[in-house]
Amino acid sequence: MDPGKIMQVGMGFFTSKALLSAVELGVFSELAKNPATADEIGETLGIAPRGRFDFLDGLVALGFLERGGDGAGGLYSNAADSDLFLDRAKPTYVGGILEMANARLYPFWSDLTEALRTGAPQNEVKHTGTPMFDELYADPDRLEQFMHAMAGISAGNFHALAEKFDFSRYASLTDVGGATGQLSMIIAGRHPQISCTSCDLPVVRPIAERVIAAAGMNDRVSAAELDFLTQPIPPADVVTMGMILHDWNLERKRHLVRAAYDALPEGGAFIVVENLIDDARRENVFGLMMSLNMLIEFGDAFDYTGADFAGWCREVGFREIEIMPLAGPASAGIAYK
C-alpha cells in the first residue's frame, strides 16, 4: 500500500495554483516570443527573486516548461502543448478558462464542504445576493471575456462534432445559448449547405455579430436574440446546445428538452455537447467534478449521464438517442425526432 495517490490528489492545489498563476502572469505568452533565463523572466513579469527558480523549475518538473542548461544561465522555453494552448497570441489559446478558474472558481471551491452540507451555491450570490449570470451579464466586458474563455475550451469538441456527425441531411441549425457563434461558425465552415443561427440574450448579440463578421461568415451565420427559458426556440432541422443543459435544475432541463423537440421537424436532431458522465458513474472524473462545480455555481444545477439525457428525451417523444464521444471527457448526446 502506497499513499502516493492520496497525497498527490490531496495536495493537488499546489500544482494547480502554480499553473494558474503562470497563466495569470503571462509566463507562456512571454516565452512564446523567445527562451529566457529566470532573471529575465522575473524582471519582465514582476516575479520577485525569492520565488523565481522554484516557480519556473516547478513548471519544468510538471512538464509545462523546458529548460536548456542549469543554474542562472539556464534558458526556459515552453513545452510544445503549453506553447500551442497557453500563448495568448495564438488562436488555439485555452487559458481563458484557466484565468476564470483562477479569478473565480479557485476561491469558491474552498467552500465545497459548505456546499455539500447545505446544497447552496458558493459563488457571487453568497456574497452579494446576485446570481452568477446576473452578475456576469451586467458587465459587457466581463461577459465577453467569459464567452471567449468558454470558446477556448469548446473549440475541440465543436470541431469533433462537425467532423463526426452526419450533417449532410440538414439545411438549417439553431444553436441555443450560442455565445460568440463559435459552434455555428465551425459547423457552417465544414458543411456549406447549412444555414446557422446563433441565439442568445440581447446583450450577447452585438458580441456575436462582431465575432461572426471578423470571421467573414455573415453570409452563413446570423446572430439572434433569445431568452430560451421564456421564448420558443426558432425552428430548424438541428437544434444544438453546447454546455447549456448542465447549468440548470431538473425542471428546467426538461423544459429545454421539450423546447428543442417543439422546434424540430420530423427527422430533426437535437444535439447537446457536455462532459457527459458515464452511466455507471465510475470513470469520467472531469464530468463528476464539473457537476460539483455546478453545485458551487448554482446549487441545484448538475451534470448528467447519457442515460439521464436519453430518459428526458424519450419523455417528450424523441424516437432514437445516441451518445457520440468527442474530445477528452466530452460527448455529444443526440436525439432524433
Image (tube, rainbow, N blue to C red):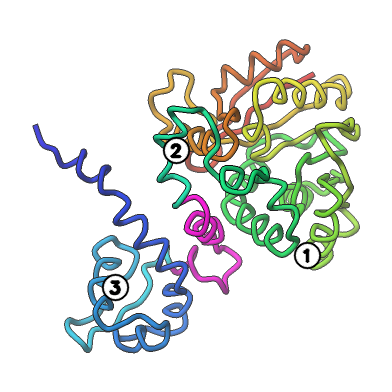
Magenta stretch contains residue 103: yes
Q: Residues within 10 Å of mark 1 (few under 14, many from 20)?
A: few
Q: Which mark is residue 215?
A: 1
The quarter in which the C terminus is drawn is top right
Closer to us: 281 or 238? 281
The residue that label 3 is drawn on is: 56
Left or right side of 142 for 331: left
- Mark identifier at residue 286: 2
Asked whether 119 or 32 is in front, the reply is 119
Amino acid under disc 2 = Phe
Residue 283 in the image, given as x and y percentages of width and height: 39, 28
Residue 153 is marked as: none
The N terminus lies in quadrant: top left
Identity of the residue drawn at 71% across and 31% down: 271
User: What is the three-letter code of the residue carrying label 3?
Assistant: Leu
In the depicted structure, whether residue 81 falls above or below residue 29: above
Residue range of the region highlighted in magenta in the rendering: 83-106
**Residue 276 belongs to the span the image colors magenta:** no
Q: Is residue 163 left or right of residue 36?
A: right
